[in-house]
Image (cartoon, rainbow, N blue to C red):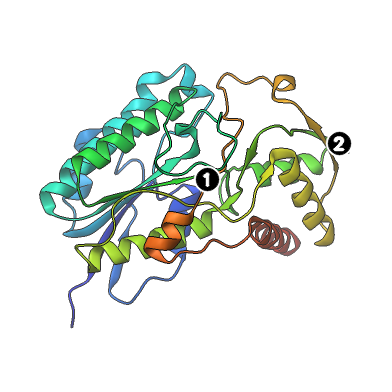
Amino acid sequence: MAEPIHILVTGGAGQVGLELQSIGWPEGVVLHAPTRAELDLGDAASIRAAFAAAPFAAVINAGAYTAVDRAEGEVAMAFAANAMGPTVLADLTRAAGVPLVQVSTDYVFDGSKTEPYVEEDPVGPLGVYGASKLAGELAVLAGNPRSVVMRTAWVLGVHRANFLKTMLRLAAERPVLRVVGDQHGCPTGARDIAAALKVITLRMIADADAPTGVYHFVNAGETTWAGLATEIMARSAEAGGPSASVEAITTADYPTPAKRPANSRLSTARLTRDYGIAPRPWQDVVAEIVAELNAERAAA
C-alpha cells in the first residue's frame, strides 16, 4: 500500500479552506487543516509546530488576515499573518524540499490599469492589506523556488461572510440596495479557487519541474459590485429567495478606511496555458451559490 500524501492547509476555517476540505481528493491524500489555535500565521512557533506534525508533501497557505479596512489601524497584525507567516512557511517548505502554494489578492494592484491585469504588471497596493499580502508574495517567491502565488479576487461562497451572503441578508431587510458601481472586477467562487489549488498542488507534488511563479485565478467575465448585486437579486428571485432593486452609487458615495482598486480584473491566460485550468463564467457561480443557500433556507 502506498504511503499517504500529507498536505497542510492553513486557514482551514475560511471560505477557501473549507472548500479545500470538502472537494474530492485522490485516494491516499490526507489533508491537514489545523484550527487557528493550532496554527496561527502570526506566530512563528505555532507554524513550525504544525509543520512538524507530519511529513508534508506540500503546503497550501489559504489563511490570511483579511479585514481590509481594519488593517489600516492594525498594521503589525496584518503583516504578522500576511508577510511573516508566509516567510516562515517558505523557509520550512524549502528546507523540506516541498512545494508551497500561496493564495494572494488583486489588492496588490492600484487599479489604475484599464485592461485586465497580467502577472507581470507593476504592483502598487493602495492600503495596508494589499501591502501585507504583497510582502507575503515576495517572501514566498524568494524563500522557496518551488512555489506558486495564486492571486484571486471578489471571493464568493456558501461559507463564512462574503458579498453575496451580505446582499441576500440585506435584501430581506430593505427594498433598495445602494451598491458601488464604479469598481470593476471578476467575481470568483471559493469552490472554484479550491479546485484550481488542488490541480496546482497535486501537479507540483508529482512533478518537480511543474511551473512556478505568479498566477491569476478568477472566474470568467467581469462586472461591477452593483452588477454583481443585480445578478444575485435576479438569481435569488428565481429561486424564491429574498430580492431587492439595486441602485448603483460611486466609490465617493461610500467612503471606506481602505481604498479599493477601481479595476480588479485579472487575466487568467497564463494559468490556462501552464496548468490547463479554464475558469467558468462568474454567473454560473452566483447561480450555484444562491441555489445552495436557498435550499439550505428551505430545509431549515
Q: Amino acid at mark 2?
A: Val
Name the spot of residue 46 as percent of width and height, x first.
23, 39
Rounded to the nearest angstrom, the CA distance separating label 2 from label 1 is: 30 Å
Q: Which residue is mark 2?
A: 176
User: Tag on residue 266?
Assistant: 1
Residue drawn at x 47%, y 34% is 66
Dot 1 falls on a residue whose secondary structure is loop
Total numbered circles? 2
Q: Quadrant of residue 205?
A: bottom left
Dot 2 falls on a residue whose secondary structure is strand
Relative to 276, say whether 177 is above or below. Answer: above
Residue drawn at x 46%, y 64% is 277
Give left or right: position of 253 versus 156.
Answer: right
Name the spot of residue 67 as percent of width and height, x first.
50, 30
Q: Amino acid at mark 1?
A: Leu
Q: Quadrant of the N terminus?
A: bottom left
Contact (Cβ within 8 Å) of mark 2 with mark 1: no
Q: Which comes sooner in the sequence, label 2 or label 1?
A: 2
Q: Is residue 267 visible?
A: yes
Give left or right: position of 41 versus 158.
Answer: left
